[in-house]
Amino acid sequence: MSAARVAHGTRASRIGLPLFVALLLVLAAAPWWADRQGLRLMGEVYAYAALASLWNLLAGYAGLVTVGQQAFVGLGAYVLFSLALLFGVNPLWGIPAAGLLGALAAVPVAALTFRLRGAYFAIGTWVVAEVFRLFAAQFTALGGGSGTSLPASVVATIASGRAAREQLLYWLALGLAVLVLLAILLLLRSRHGLALAAIRDNEVAARSCGVEVDRTRLAVFVVASAGAAMAGALIFLQKLRISPDAAFSVNDWTALVIFIAVIGGIGRVEGPLIGTALFFLLRETLSQLGSLYLMVLGAVAIAVMLYAPRGLWGVLAERLGWQVFPLARRLEPRPAPPAVLQERRAP
């Protein structure tokens, strides 16, 4: 009898993954077929896809339902502006620096908020984000509560010319989204991914089986915080202006991100990507309708939670078996070597 092997891929993923790679190649060539406005819009799409994927990693896999992700978005943005304006560092270097400081800041934040559970944890993360916002408002070197802008001399160091700068920022946004997605996939396919699956299904049972729940959640929280900080730095580098209210906006960087993850499908890597596409489709077609636009978003969210609680991608995956990123582990029989096959065929 041939031995079994652990397999990740399915027939659907063998088709979906190459199609996704082909889509990435088309998007990477966007500076040659899209205008400046289109590049900025797609850069915003990539930023929201990254933030939604990180929130999905926290809530959908680690069970950390946070409403304070804007704390690290704003922190990353202020790190970039501080390095550029106060220390003369090229703004592009501020993006990885924001990720590093975001990861470091996540450790004391986790030490404080991980003592809370459920709704108390969510409220605690929001309170931490408000503390970050109030502290930034007192930072007079960067404009205090009114904020500040990057001067033209600093902007000129990003790239030579406006067109080159727009193209570079677009590629950075696409690269960051791909980096976040790749990091999540590698994490979920590692032994830490198995631990997260156990924690998500039953935390008590996971602890009884020897899973280090707190350490695993801390690792996920640090990774998500670093990614959110890098996304925040890139977002406000595109905007060229920062203020505490904009950088630490719970509506822009958490409420909308949660909406995207919910309608796409929490607990699935593909869910935030589908949710981001649907959100921007609704925004670009209905944003001119004023309050009706917000009503439509609310109606969509309620309808999805009532009739598709696992999200739109969850419905497609269950009914059609669609899959892009292979994560589930299953046993498949290992093909027997040719010598064994010949012995079996012999009379």
Image (cartoon, grey):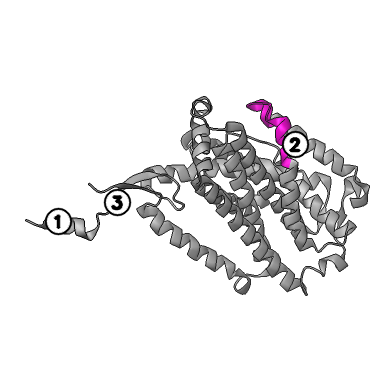
How many marks overall? Answer: 3
* Residue at the spot of label 3: 334
What secondary structure is found at the residue carrying circle 2? Answer: helix
Name which residue type carries label 2. Pro
* Residue at the spot of label 1: 343
* Residue 108: numbered disc: 2
Whole-number angstrom distance, CA of label 2 to CA of label 1? 63 Å
Q: Is residue 53 left or right of residue 76?
A: left
Name which residue type carries label 3. Arg
Q: Quadrant of residue 167?
A: bottom right
Q: Is residue 290 visible?
A: no
Label 2 neighbourhood size at 10 Å, few (<14), some (14-19), many (20+)?
A: few
Label 1 neighbourhood size at 10 Å, few (<14), some (14-19), many (20+)?
A: few
Point 64% across, 48% down: residue: 51
Q: Which of the two discs, 2 and 1, labels the residue nearer the N terminus?
A: 2
What secondary structure is found at the residue carrying circle 1? Answer: helix
User: Which portion, as a residue range, is magenta?
Assistant: 106-122
Q: Is residue 225 left or right of residue 332?
A: right
Point 57% across, 33% down: residue: 212
Point 68% across, 44% down: residue: 225
Query: Is residue 332 a member of the stretch shown in magenta?
Result: no
**Residue 25 percent across, percent down from the top left:** 53, 67
